[in-house]
């Protein structure tokens, strides 16, 4: 990587941008390749309570038009917290297959 | 209002006059009285802010971060090991650019256990990204707490401030103090709303993860804000002098203009050193004293300008960095790099060991004779 050397006095004040904050929804980071297991939702049992959405540490869950939670498979790193918090146990665990070959 | 107050009461009065909204604390000797004073006011209904006692200093500092993130004016106080337990949170508070004021009452570090003052605890926080004001008198503590809010809440700076006083020497010693009227402080201190703050109605993340060069940019901005704060601190000190007549500077120079030897030091003992300087002056020896009040950001240029033409300099450290020497010494040496002065280091008063006027006379006599840099202990 090419880098350049700047003088201390030439550092610009970025104002508000200098404060480490994010106003938009937290930037989604793709960590699908961390995953060994993935959550699979049984929509017949789901009661749309939103617990999985609330607890997901990576904000991988979103809601579809009918109000059902949908897991973004690119973002989900497979921590399976959603499986633990689901009150009706409608999320099952499935092993990822053929991941090595996909690369 | 003129009153006879000790340093702890001064810090508490500073917080009260600044109309602090949240005080998360955990008591420790010799800070406890600050907390007791505010608690008593709270019980009597004289203190409108929130007063929270947490289960440890780490939690207190975390609560400070949370409170100041929402834009509440936050105050806390601690000492010694308590400050070290807070240390984990301090770079987070400055990194999130949340303004607040922390009064540290210097006390030596364990082990062996000691209750008395030296500066090892506060100076250990010098890299945490906090502005640091180190006081000499009780009056200065009170004034600094009020000024610190105006410095830290400046939209260009947004950095937390440490106001340091010495345990016992300040904290439990009563002196005559002028407590400014509430109206005067209200006029001096506006409470600007933070542009970036936590609000339930406008959700956001503060203290986001930053990878690679982004991390470096945020650190660079922190450094930039620190460097910019020189002007802000200067302006605030001038504004305070206008309203109260009490003038403060980055460097407190005492009879340095024609001096041949000068003591450079921080903290409460400078009062004793001052009278030693007077004693020497009466005997016709040209000596002076320079007390560093603003320790972070370090006023390197001003220090160089003040000391450049002085032949012999004694840097007095009431702290010890084992394996290196005094903490202040290398900073002064760095400011004077390329100059031909003789700069000697004296370690004294660790663990609150009493230092008398004559001890400073000895140091001044010793440094007047010195021909090369040296590191010494006074015991």
Image (cartoon, helix red, strand yellow):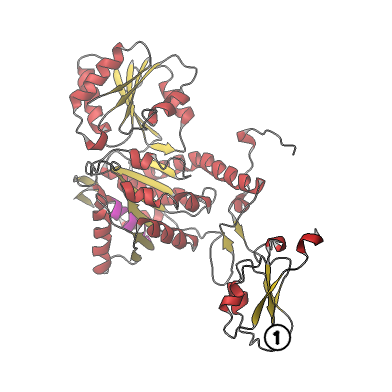
Name the quarter where the C terminus of chain B is drawn.
Answer: top left
Q: For residue A50, which quarter of the picture?
A: bottom right
Q: Nearer the viewer, residue B140 or B378?
A: B378
Question: In the image, is residue A33 above or below residue A85?
Answer: above
Q: For residue B292, which quarter of the picture?
A: top left
Image position, residue B199 (x, y; %): 54, 68
Image position, residue B14 (x, y; %): 32, 53
Residue at 22% of width from left, 21% of height from top? B361
Secondary structure mostly seen in magenta is helix
Q: Indicate the chain on which mark 1 is placed.
A: A
Q: Which residue is mark 1?
A: A43
Q: Is residue B73 visible?
A: no
Q: Nearer the viewer, residue A101 or B291?
A: A101
The span shown in magenta is: B11-21
Q: Nearer the viewer, residue B259 or B295?
A: B295
Q: Nearer the viewer, residue A84 or B304?
A: A84
Q: For residue B366, which quarter of the picture?
A: top left
Question: In the image, is residue B190 above or below residue A66?
Answer: above
Q: Is residue B14 magenta?
A: yes
On the picture, is B222 further left or further right than B286? Answer: right
Question: In the image, is residue B36 above or below residue B376?
Answer: below
Pointer 1: residues within 10 angstroms few (<14), some, or many (20+)?
few
Among all residues in the image, which is located at the extreme right? A102
On the picture, is B51 further left or further right than B379? Answer: right
């Amino acid at each position: 990587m090419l880098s350049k050397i700047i003088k201390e006095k030439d550092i610009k004040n970025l104002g508000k941008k200098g404060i480490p904050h994010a106003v938009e929804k937290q930037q989604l980071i793709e960590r699908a390749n961390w995953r060994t297991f993935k959550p699979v939702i049984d929509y017949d049992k789901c009661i749309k309570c939103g617990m999985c959405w609330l607890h997901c540490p990576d904000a991988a869950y979103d809601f579809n038009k009918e109000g059902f939670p949908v897991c973004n498979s690119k973002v989900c790193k497979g921590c399976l917290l959603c499986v633990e918090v689901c009150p009706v146990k409608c999320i099952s665990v499935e092993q990822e297959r053929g991941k090595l070959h996909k690369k | 209002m003129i009153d006879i107050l000790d340093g702890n009461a001064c810090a508490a009065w500073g917080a009260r006059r600044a109309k602090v909204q949240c005080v998360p604390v955990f008591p420790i000797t010799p800070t406890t009285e600050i907390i007791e004073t505010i608690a008593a006011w709270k019980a009597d209904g004289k203190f409108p802010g929130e007063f929270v006692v947490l289960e440890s200093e780490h939690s207190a500092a975390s609560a400070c971060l949370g409170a100041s993130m929402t834009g509440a004016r936050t105050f806390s106080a601690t000492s010694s090991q308590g400050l070290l337990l807070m240390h984990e949170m301090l770079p987070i508070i400055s990194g999130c650019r949340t303004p607040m004021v922390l009064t540290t009452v210097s006390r030596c570090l364990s082990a062996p256990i000691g209750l008395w003052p030296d500066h090892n605890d506060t100076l250990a926080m010098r890299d945490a990204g906090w502005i640091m004001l180190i006081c000499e008198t009780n009056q200065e503590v009170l004034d600094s707490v009020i000024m610190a809010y105006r410095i830290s809440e400046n939209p260009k700076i947004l950095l937390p401030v440490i106001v340091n006083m010495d345990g016992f020497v300040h904290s439990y010693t009563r002196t005559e103090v002028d407590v400014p009227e509430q109206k005067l402080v209200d006029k001096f201190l506006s409470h600007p709303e933070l542009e970036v703050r936590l609000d339930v109605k406008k959700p956001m993340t503060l203290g986001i993860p930053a990878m690679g060069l982004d991390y470096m940019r945020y650190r660079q901005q922190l450094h930039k804000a620190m460097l910019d704060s020189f002007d802000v601190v200067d302006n605030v000190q001038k504004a305070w002098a206008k309203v109260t007549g009490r003038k403060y500077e980055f460097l407190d120079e005492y009879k340095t203009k024609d001096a041949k030897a000068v003591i450079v030091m921080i903290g409460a003992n400078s009062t004793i050193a001052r009278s030693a300087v007077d004693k020497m002056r009466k005997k016709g020896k040209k000596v002076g004293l320079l007390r560093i009040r603003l320790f972070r950001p370090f006023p390197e240029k001003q220090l160089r300008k003040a000391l450049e033409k002085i032949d012999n300099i004694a840097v007095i450290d009431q702290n010890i960095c084992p394996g290196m020497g005094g903490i202040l010494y290398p900073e002064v040496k760095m400011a004077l790099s390329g100059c031909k002065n003789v700069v000697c280091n004296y370690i004294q008063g660790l663990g609150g060991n009493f230092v008398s006027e004559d001890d400073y006379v000895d140091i001044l006599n010793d440094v007047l004779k010195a021909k090369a840099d040296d590191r010494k202990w006074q015991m």
